[in-house]
Image (spheres, rainbow, N blue to C red):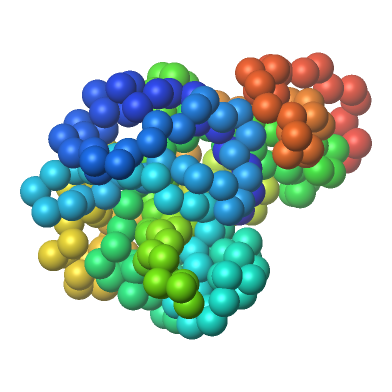
Amino acid sequence: MCGRYALTQNESELIEEFAITGILPNFDPLPANWNIKPTEEIYIIRNNEDNRELATTSWGIIAPWSKSDVEALRSQSQAINARSESIHEKPTFRNAFKSRRCLIPATGYYEWATELGKYKTKQPVFISNESEKPLAFAGIYEKWISPNGEIKESAAIITREAVAGLAKVHHRMPVFLPKDRWDSWLDKKNNEIAKVRSLMEVAEPAAGLRFWPVSDAVNSIRNNGVELINEIELGEPETLF
């Protein structure tokens, strides 16, 4: 599960880190955001012809069969994550998984503790890269045409079963793709389902990650600032484990 995340790197930093060679003519840079919420505009990285492109879209896949803007928004808020185990089978996701895959960059993401561990239930935790480089979530994107002819693009983060220390916070985690798999993942011609699914199988899915407890302030979408990712001191553990 990933319901909120942060991205503080600007477009120049992302262009360098992800070797991006193309940007849409009407590209509108996004500001740093420490509390990205579902349906909000986000960055994605995808292939467009011969270019690796930085684009913006909204978070949460719009169901292709949506018949109105209201239906589209409702479906989008329910499809911010796609399970890696079944993404190739679900009607909302399967076509995008076959040919419209992307990377979703993040400085880090928030999770709310639900498993047995040292954290109280619903304790917000921030997870990021030890190297301080942006994370690369495996993602998919889709296009939907509204009744008035407007083309709307949307994206979802792919998740998997949590492992290592993250499993003591929550039972799900995003799928992180190492750099040596980016080309294959973004290649639209790579549409053999078994091969694409194998790209998500990483020997140590949580390698290089660190995490710490943060304030409940992240619970409100009105709050947005670097203070949201500051580590806080915890009281005594509320479980026996």
The residue at the point 20 percent across, 72 percent down is 192
The residue at the point 33 percent across, 21 percent down is 13
Compare residues 7 and 190 and report the one nearer the observer.
7
The residue at the point 18 percent across, 39 percent down is 22
Residue 136 position in % (x across, y down): 38, 39
Residue 125 position in % (x across, y down): 69, 33
Question: Can the viewer see residue 213?
Answer: no
Drawn side of residue 87 relative to residue 77, left or right: left
Q: Quadrant of residue 217?
A: top right
Q: Quadrant of residue 224?
A: top right
Question: Can the viewer see residue 120?
Answer: yes
Residue that extends furthest to the left in the rendered view of this protein: 50
Residue 234 position in % (x across, y down): 83, 22
Compare residues 32 and 178 and report the one nearer the observer.
32
Q: Quadrant of residue 67?
A: bottom right
Residue 64 position in % (x across, y down): 45, 77
Drawn side of residue 184 relative to residue 221, left or right: left
